[in-house]
Image (cartoon, grey):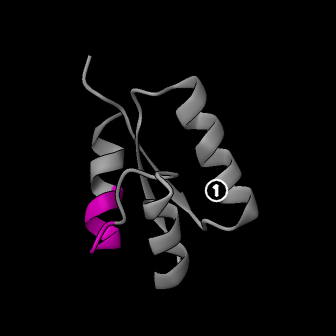
């Protein structure tokens, strides 16, 4: 089975908390995060998400193809 991709849109209090819980319970999941530039940078630096995509649509396709 290939690694599952997920994307969280909005990395504020709720989105980042959700990401932390997902990473804790499912460390094999690859998490994309999407938010304003400053918030996204903080989430990536703190390893809350694995990647901040350059292109929203491409990331969404990757997530959909992983199911």
Residue 59 in the image: x percent, y percent? 31, 60
Horizontal side of 64 relative to 43 (left or right) equals: left
User: Residue at point 25% right, 64% down?
Assistant: 58
Q: Quadrant of residue 15 in the image?
A: bottom right
Q: Residue at x 65, y 37 (%)?
A: 21
Which residue lies at the image location 41% right of the left edge and 33% below the top edge? 29
Q: Is residue 47 magenta?
A: no
Q: In the visual, does 42 lie left or right of 21?
A: left
- Magenta residue span: 53-60
Picture coordinates of residue 30, whole percent (x, y): 37, 40
Secondary structure that dominates the magenta span? helix
Give the quadrant of the C terminus: top left
Residue 56 painted magenta: yes
User: Is residue 58 at least partly visible in the picture?
Assistant: yes
Q: Is residue 5 above or below residue 12?
A: above
Question: Dot 1, how many residues are within 10 Å of its Cα: few (below 14), some (14-19), or many (20+)?
Answer: many
């Amino acid at each position: 089975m290939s690694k599952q991709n997920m994307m969280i849109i909005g990395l504020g209090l709720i989105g980042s908390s959700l990401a932390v819980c997902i990473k804790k319970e499912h460390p094999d999941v690859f998490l994309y995060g999407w938010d304003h530039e400053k918030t996204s940078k903080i989430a990536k630096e703190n390893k809350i998400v694995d990647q901040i995509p350059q292109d929203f649509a491409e990331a969404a396709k990757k997530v959909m193809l992983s199911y």
